[in-house]
Amino acid sequence: MKISDRAMLLTSAAEARYAERAGIRVKRLQEADKGNIWAADDPERVAKRLAHVRTTERAVTASTLMLTEHVPPLDEIDADTLVAQLAQERAIGRDDLVTPQFLRLALAAAHCVGRITVRGPSGVLLGYGTGMLVGPSILLTNHHVLERAADAAQSEVTFGFEASTTLVSEERVFRLTPQKLFITDEALDFTFVAVSPTDSRGVPGTDLGYICLNPQEGKAINGEFVNVIQHPNGGPKMFALRENRIVDVLTNYLHYVADTAPGSSGAPVFNDQFEMVALHHSGVPERDSQGRILNRDGQPWTSDQGEARVQWKANEGVRVSVLVERAKELARTIEEQAQLAQALDLSRAVPQLEAADPSQQTASDAVASAQRPSIKGDVATWTIPLSVSVSLSGIFNREGPSGSTALPAMTPALPSRTSALSPEMSPELMRAVGRARDVFRTIPGLLLVRAGWQFTDGWITDQAVIVAIVEEKKTTASLLEQGLPKLPSTFDGFPVDVRQASAEEFYELSRLNGSEAFTERTANPTYKKPPHLSLPRVKEHMKVSVHVSPEQGWPVLDAFLQETNRKLTIAMYDFGAPHIIDAIAKRLEAQSAQLQLVMQYGASVGTGTKAGDSDDADTVRTLKGVLGDDFEMQWANVGQTGSLWASAYHIKVAVRDSSAFWLSSGNWQSSNQAPDAPPADQASAKALLTNYNREWHVVIDNPTLAGIFESYIQYDFAQSSGFVPKGAELAYELLPPLDPDPREASAEIRTFDPLEIDREVDVQPVLTPDNYVQVVLPLIEGAKSRIYLQNQYINESLDPRAEQTYIQLLKAIARKQREGLDVRIILRAENGVEARHIEFMKTHGIDMGRVRWRNRTHTKGIIVDSARVLLGSHNWSYDGTVLNRDASLLFYDVEIARYLESIFIYDWESWSRSTVYVRPGKPKVQEIASPEELAELKAAVYQGEIRARRLFHPDD
């Protein structure tokens, strides 16, 4: 197996650190060899080590690294005497004798160490690593072993994978469950992930025990030995004992000489008391005089030889004390903090121990019993196989039955109102899905096997199923005729639901699988945050007009445009409404004002309210013809290999004279900006509400904010300079007939006047790819009473990178529902919704009973606690929240929040329903290869013969 790029980066970094400290390392090791312990390491670290030795002295009295004589309390002996005694009686680097007790501790620790089998989203084997249980059903390994929760969800850990000619190896396989806990850090190269509580046979894993992580310093210093328990090269468990010397202690790392190999990544590194001191993650290779890495034969090493052939001269592990502190910082939710606390519970420290008779205990018994202390008064006693008595004074203060002290609850109780169990939370289903992937993988046309939900009578149920996504769903007769196998109706006790891939799903899977079927959309956009620009929170005096479409969108926008004197700077996704084009052209021509425009190339085809709209290219030609040299524009660099943004330049912002700006969820199309607004009477109001989009807009007169957005638009203009979009259009998906909502006929008709503010306002500008998740995730997690979310859609993402960004937003919403908050969601309905998107929400914990559907909702907003509100252009998808160009504003303002909340409640109660048409998976796609074909498609749409939308650009 070739060495990975990630492993090479880790190796290079470790090597640099090793080389950097050559002089310090040699000098200190020389002092250690002389017995000068105080000079072998930093004095402060040595002092901590001596104090730690004192507290654990009686734990392993026969260990050669512990003092063999009684150590009086530190206040009864001066430091010099203690150092001298320690130097005389410790056999650092010279004595490899160990006691049976040492081996018993090694076996007990080894019981908690397993081999990780890493698989990708499709179930393909990616490699192996080592990990250890550090809490009840909590595994610790390297980040470079498990980088993403999506990979962890397909991976497993095997305990008891050992080679022996005299003992039967009892292998036990456990699935990883990252949806319960997944905390990772690339810089320090660690990952905490939850493990299924039962193995593949349904047997609980409580007997495995776990290794305590003690974040206190003082567990190891220069010159001491360490022990590594590992699965090198993915093989059986191996021990590297004693002849593994610490050669340097850095701020974040330990360097040591040990016999490790690939597959050892993620292995625990122990001192001789079998306290974990580091997490092994990389090595330092030997090099020749020309700087070439050497293999084990002393010859130049090449990457095709694999890591196993590298000659390592030292190894590097991340210090436990450092990774523990970092993990605490990363655990942001209550659930994460509670689970992590089980691995970092300092009440399991061992300050006082008494010898016990371990003759009748196995290694697994030793660790298991350590988790079941007997508690009397304020003293808890473990057996490991030593009796461990720990004073609990001041730690536990709740009385249990019969006057005993009860252990504190580590996980907060959840309210009784919870959503149904998700497929990932069912070990049986996930095991069945994994086996189904192996069994079905050779079937032609099979794209994906995943967990899902059964739909009955057009709506989602609580029945979990195995979903098999195929390129084309065939009848039984067709399969027999073509000699193709038929997928079973059930597998391992679960129904098998065979579905044909939707158009978007097919292209997404093709992209992730490296196919050439989809080359128009880049998976790795090249946008870089501008180093000279920032998005600060602004709290200043400003004039603000908050308003909504369809009733007030165009009147307010028209007034905004008519006040232009010098320049309009516009960033827009779609721009084809004739009344907006005409208003801008007339005003700017009259004022000899300039227009700078950045826009995505394409056309938004439609019928009804958009039947007379022009495509973007026609808009540009019209404006250029009127404004001449006062008009400059640039097509946004998007949607192609090497583009700045993945699939859409989806922003909707216009800056006027560098001092005021308009920002919205809606494009400049007739459907977003009704030309007949405001309504003259109830009848026209009903016509507007029935036929045009619901949008949230804002106009702000404030030079600071206007300057921020104008600078970013100009940056986009410059970065897109020279970009020429491809002439051919992307494919269009043919849509089903409109899904009428019977509630609309009897809906209460209300319209809302703009909210006008002239005072200090606190607002945070938000852009993707710059800061959306960083702003919105804390917004959701900080909710105390209610969250109201209205968006065009919440779409599934098959991209594994979404797990750490976009999907975290959805999980945060679900957590707030489980905590009992009033969480309501309104999504768009009239085109129907693919089953996979509904499953995606339910799978990640969303209570579908609190989701409603409204025709023509195009708003992208979130209201929290009636006090904070986000509005803008961000759809909820991986691209929309992470990779595209979108713009929003987060207002920390009760008046604005309550104004929009009243409109949300009106939409919820009068215009929304609880179910939606579920679109079939069969893709109906018309590929556009020429302007003539596009014209034919648009003509058919305008004449009402068909309905269509651009794939991957479902905006309106």
Image (cartoon, helix red, strand yellow):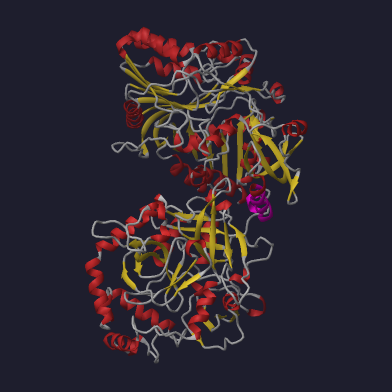
Position of residue 221 measured from the top left corner of the image (x, y, whole percent):
34, 75
Relative to 727, is 10 above or below? Answer: below
Position of residue 59 measured from the top left corner of the image (x, y, whole percent):
47, 84
Q: Quadrant of residue 315?
A: bottom left
Residue 425 inside the magenta-drawn segment: yes
Residue 327 inside the magenta-drawn segment: no
Which residue sits at x=33%, y=23%?
722
Q: Quadrant of residue 792?
A: top right
Position of residue 870 measured from the top left corner of the image (x, y, whole percent):
48, 36
Q: Nearer the viewer, residue 2 or 86?
A: 2
Q: Is residue 605 left or right of residue 318?
A: right
Relative to 357, is 782 above or below? Answer: above
Taking the image as drawn, is residue 98 in sight?
A: yes
Q: Nearer the viewer, residue 226 or 737?
A: 226
Image quarter of the C terminus: top right
Stretch of the chain drawn in magenta = 422-436
